[in-house]
Amino acid sequence: MAGEIHTIQFSDQDYMKAAEKWEKQLLLMPLFAAQDTLKYMKGVPGVRNAVHLGTAESSAQFAPYKARRSSAGTTDIIYRELRTYFGNVVEYFEPNAYITTLLGEGAAFLGEGQAQAPSAKLVLAAVMKSLGHHLEAELFKAERDGTGDTTHDLFDGWGTIVNNEIDDGNISAALGNLMELEEAITDVNACDIAKQILFSLDPHLRAQQLFLYCSQEFADQYNESYLSTHAAIPYNTQYNQAYVEGSGNRMTLAPLPCLENTDMFFVSSRDNMLYGYDNMSDVERIVVKDYEPFVLTLAAAMFFGVNFRSIDKRMLKVVKLAASSNDNNDDNNN
């Protein structure tokens, strides 16, 4: 009948079938939701528990020709472990609430317009996507605790790994993969500090396409500092500076929400920042069940973890930040 209003409804069986049919895609939704950060890193699929990744280091070299030339083995393979941890979630959700969110509050469809309604698959994807926001927030800060109940406890984030390596003496100023800033970053000195970081890099690292993984606050401070110190330069045609000056457009600022309120930044290439997941295992599952009226239970399990391929100075530079001015003021007031 013309003008008849059709509402959007799915049965519990629709959700169960969608979870079964689209299981692999839905399990990847948390990673898709974290892509604002993970797009600067390299994903390694099919990692269940652990995989050892090696980098070769050799002092072998050419020398003037000698018929009987020989040398002892000079090649070492250094392995780092990319470990993923098995985690799960049991989430209760009200499908109608997600439908309303996806369609817009109070949305309804007339006639054949109902064909444009979100499917049960999209509703489940919205639930899984919400899990990705917690994952993204913990990529650097997470600390593995097998007895924990949050994403923070699932794996060791990149920042936690660095702190452990510093404690073990594997990352240090002497080794060339650590730099400790002596002054707090401000709108005035941010540009100079960025160049100081750049100039401190090992030449092999500096020659690569790099990201300066930093906070949004630092990116803002860099832009303000750049604006005030380069106002008269003709090529300064835009406010947002994507690259650190002097890098030959090889060191890109990568401001990440998950690095806000942390005490370190990182300089590395995308290929050195690894995250592992397993979208191939039959252990990873997503199931939807109806245990009470109007509410469904989504149960999902997946593997996830991060690490660096190498922490050698030719692959990584960790930048420890100095105490902020606010921290100093707080100390003086105590």
Image (cartoon, grey):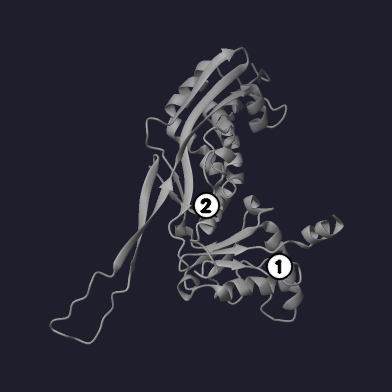
The outermost residue toward the bottom is 64
Q: Which amino acid does label 2 sit on?
A: Ile
Residue at the spot x=23%, y=72% of the render? 72
Q: Give the vertical position of 113 relative to 242 (above or below).
A: above
Q: Residue 196 at x, y = what percent?
A: 62, 74
Q: Give the vertical position of 26 relative to 182 (above or below).
A: above
Quadrant (top left/top right/bottom left/bottom right) for the N terminus: top right
Q: Give the vertical position of 266 relative to 232 (above or below).
A: above
Callout count: 2
Q: Quick check: 121 left or right of 195?
A: left
Q: Residue 179 at x, y = what percent?
A: 59, 68
Residue at the spot x=54%, y=26% of the render? 120
Q: Are marks 1 and 2 in contact (CB under 8 Å)?
A: no
- Location of residue 106 by image quarter: top right
Q: Mark 2 packing: few (<14 Cα in 10 Å), some, or many (20+)?
A: some
Residue at the spot x=57%, y=53% of the render? 159
Residue occupied by mark 2: 161
Q: Quick check: 167 left or right of 107?
A: left
Quadrant (top left/top right/bottom left/bottom right) for the C terminus: bottom right
Q: What element carries label 1?
A: helix
Q: Residue 209 at x, y = what percent?
A: 49, 67
Q: What residue type is labelled 1?
A: Asn
**Tag 2 or tag 1, which sits nearer the N-term?**
2
Between 280 and 10, the one nearer to me in the picture:
280
Between 104 and 192, the one nearer to me in the picture:
192
Q: Residue 252 at x, y = what percent?
A: 57, 65
Residue occupied by mark 1: 223
Residue 213 seen from this side:
no
Q: Quick check: 330 left or right of 26?
A: right
Q: Mark 1 packing: few (<14 Cα in 10 Å), some, or many (20+)?
A: many
